[in-house]
Amino acid sequence: MAKILVDINVILDAVLNRDEISSALLDKLADSHHELFITASMVAILDYFLNKYNANKAEFKKKFFSRFKVITTSGMDALNALSFEDGEDALIALAFRRVAENGLIITKDKKFPSNGLSVLTPEEALYNQELSDEGNETISLLDLRKEYRYLMEEIDDVILRCASGAKYILGPEVSKLEQKIANYIGVKHAIGVSSGTDALVLSLRALAIKLRGKEYWDKDDLIITTPFTFTATGEAILRAGATPLFVDITLDTYNIDPQEIKKALQTYGNQVVGILPVHLYGHPCDMDEIMDIAHKAGIFVVEDCAQSLGASWDGRQTGSFGETGCFSFFPSKPLGGFGDGGMVTTNDSELAETIRMLRTHGGRDKNRPEHIGYNARLDTLQAAILLAKLEHLDEFTEKRRQIAGFYNQNFKEIEWLILPTEHEKAFHIYHQYTVRVRGRSRDEVQEKLEKHGVKSMVYYPVPLHKMEVFHRTSMETFGDLENTETAVKSVLSLPVEPLYWGEKAILKRVRNSFKGDSR
């Protein structure tokens, strides 16, 4: 889809019915899936003419700004615009180029300073075949630049407010985000930390302090987890002093198999101190079984929720079952910041207090540390951005679920694709839409998708028990891990970028890349 800025002269001619071409063009653009923009510097001019002609501003704002995004005009844009003959138009072009370096400007001004951008008149744009909705751009797994443009009015505002407030460490936005996440998950406490990895490490460290009265677990202490996950899950266990015990997954959800947990406990007994399940791809683990097993064995549960914010099991949010839930705000996650960040959720007030100390050098105040701590705080700026994006979390989740439904409907006849499943108790957020390829080369399938402009990714090609770091330090494996071995050789994740939804012509390219391959 094109990124289009419509100049003020075109907008006014359309709104005030002064030019049929401009009116037809604006109607066409409003019904398209193109990204439409004006700049903040244009709003004052627009307001002047709306007042002059007694237009209904409330009605205009509701209709117009539902489609047009307003680009922040910076002070530096204004200063740079002074170098141009027409500073007013230059200011528009400079601001637009900052967010859309390959954008298109539609204007009646033949001398408009394009600043290297494409420029069309309204008539040229109206009949331009290249502005069809089909588009030829690559479909990415995630388009963070598009997401920024979609949310930029809110995000720019919170960034500027946070910068001018100058409370950069544990500012009010951190506390506000913690409260909102706690309410969303349905727990008493949420503690903002520097990453999802640190959320896991601090949780495991706090549990060692509470349950053993020690700073770290011992190497002989085993924590059961899945080998089919990102490195950080197992790494966190090592960093907390314990040893990961890898057990197999189920191939229907790719999550840890509760039956394998039971068998591992029968073998290792009291060596096992906890379970660290991962809600992989946004599908929750079977938390009924896992919590029942943990309670009977008298061991803890720490949930890895890096990919599952918004997912639930039997109506209850992930991150609310175990002693703690650990979330990541890495940019690609369901709720992603502009850098690293994480959150720990818990109903245990003692754990919450310990985790708060650990994230700030181990003490209640900086001069009296009680534990071996970290500099692991969530930045105020990240919290401000996350607060803005949190308002859209459920909206994006629903769009990903719609894309997953579209895929499920269109790919169900392809025999060599095993589609993802959703347990009847689960609410799957489809952080990743992951299929399995059987009876043919996964690499060839990826290459064919690439030729049709569709990106795909393998999460994860190497299981943790095959990684050098765990062989060089410590690990235990239970069973043959057959399902994990199958998954790493066959899984393939397809795009579920929420802002592509509605553009079915683009999504169909995924299906077209499989055309004739239903056998």
Image (tube, helix red, strand yellow):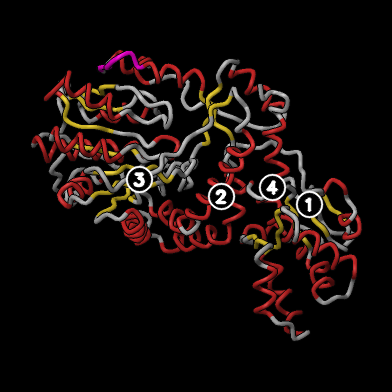
- For the residues labelled 4 and 2, the Cα–Cα distance comes to 12 Å
At numbered mark 3, what does the secondary structure look like: helix, strand or loop? strand
Question: What residue is shown with label 4?
Answer: 503
Question: What residue is shown with label 1?
Answer: 104
* Left or right, 106 with reference to 127: left
- Verify CB contact (< 8 Å) between mark 2 and mark 3: no
Q: Residue at x 68, y 79 (%)?
A: 57
> Could you tell me the amino acid type at mark 2?
Lys
- Location of the C terminus by quadrant is top right
* Left or right, 179 with reference to 116: left
- For the residues labelled 1 and 2, the Cα–Cα distance comes to 27 Å
First in residue order: circle 4 vs circle 2: 2
- For the residues labelled 2 and 3, the Cα–Cα distance comes to 20 Å
Question: What residue is shown with label 2?
Answer: 399
- For the residues labelled 4 and 3, the Cα–Cα distance comes to 31 Å
Residue 313: which disc?
3
First in residue order: circle 4 vs circle 1: 1
First in residue order: circle 1 vs circle 2: 1
> Could you tell me the amino acid type at mark 4?
Glu
> Could you tell me the amino acid type at mark 1?
Leu
Examine the rendered structure and indicate whether residue 63 appears above or below residue 438: below
- Verify CB contact (< 8 Å) between mark 1 and mark 2: no
Depth-wise, is mark 1 or mark 3 nearer the camera? 3
Depth-wise, is mark 4 or mark 1 nearer the camera? 4
